[in-house]
Amino acid sequence: MATTFLNSDYSRVVPIVSSFFTLKDIQLNVREDYIEFLVADTDIKDKFPILLKELSKIGMVPTARRQKYFSRLMPALSSAIRLQIEDGVVIAVFKVPKQKIRAKRKLPLHLIFFAIAVTFVFYDGFMRSNSIFAKTYVSDPVLLAGAYTISLMGILGIHELGHMIALKYYNIKASWPYFIPGVPGFIPTFGALITQQSNMPNKNVMFDVGFAGPIAGLIITVIVSIYGSTISTLIPLDEYQRLSEEDRLFSFNTCLLMIATLHMTDKVVENMVLVMSPLLFAAWIGFALTSINLVPAWQLDGGHLARAMFGERWHRIITYAGIGALFLMGFWPMAILVLILSQRIPSNAPLDDVTSLSQRRKMLFFITLGIAIVTAPIPSSILPWA
């Protein structure tokens, strides 16, 4: 006897969905264990959140997609006739998977990673603070290394806090941030990541969560950049050239927003070169990470914004453009990593993938692209005056 939704676990789903939407067709996928509905409604923005709440009460979760729908006219026959309906709104309902109970560690993993990252950042800061240029305004290298650690971890921490506040606001379960240790003497930390434990309900929420982190972190980065530039040392151009030849100094490509903070603190002087203090270097990392995160590629923050803005198909295309941008900025290890991971791990999709992004957020998307540009390190060959 063929299995139908009438004698399955989805029997309670049909009356709930039909109370919100006009159903045109129903199919039960036994093999993949879900039920889908072709609905006549095209505007589901207001009803879908209520449906989501109602189905959660019986351990179910819905998704909504605008896609091709195939209706089996004679499902009992192996050579069943299939009717293709283009661009229908399809609501699929799945069982919420049971979460495995994990044994609690005495010390959570995220705290272990945080402690390692702080140690690496402090050691990196101590190495950068133990020089005549760093000691110009703050003579104690330990104190300066502590300020450097607070500044850099504060930039990253506020970035992640922005994400967490947005996730909390929309009642989305997620992990604590995992800070990724780096290489002291090079880049002491590669930022942090948060793993979601539930899906984004719609594109607007996906956008807000992706937007909140970089903007929160950028505010702190600007503050650190302003203070870091005030305690940075200016040296004559000929002395800089001599030290560069001795491999005691090397230059960084800076960004337009950092250049603006240097002008604010009168650190742009003709025939003089600024030697970055450890705190200004922390701001440099903050600007660079902001730019990287806002690149519209894969599951970077900018990738989530692009996914919410353009949808799945265009998001895949834009990801390759974003990888190219990372290469042009000189972040080729990150570009390679994104390229590899984008082939293995697909982008997240909101549960309601039908409702369009709001007009206000569409405008904000282009503002974030502008922020990505002004925080990106610009090669001196493009901006020689920088």
Image (tube, rainbow, N blue to C red):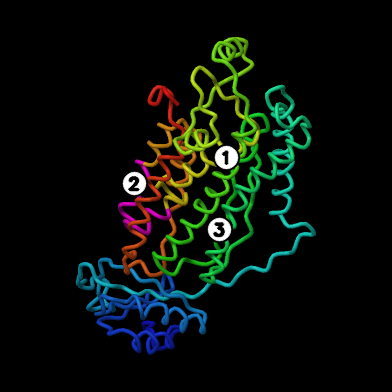
Depicted 385 relative to depicted 340: above or below: above
Nearer-N-terminus badge (1/3): 3
Residue tagged 2: 318
Nearest the viewer among 119 and 143 is 143
Picture quadrant of residue 123: top right
Amino acid marked by disc 2: Ile
Q: Say the numbered circle drawn on residue 252.
A: none
Q: Position of residue 85 (x, y in %)?
A: 20, 70
Q: Main secondary structure of the magenta part?
A: helix
Residue at 61% from the left image edge and 13% from the top image edge? 243
Nearest the viewer among 14 and 177 is 177
Q: Is residue 308 magenta?
A: yes
Residue at 70% from the left image edge and 48% from the top image edge? 113
Residue tagged 3: 162
Which quadrant of the figure contains the N terminus?
Answer: bottom left
Helix, strand, or loop for circle 1? helix
Amino acid marked by disc 1: Ile
Residue tagged 1: 226
Q: Residues within 10 Å of mark 2 (few under 14, many from 20)?
A: many
Depicted 198 relative to depicted 179: above or below: below
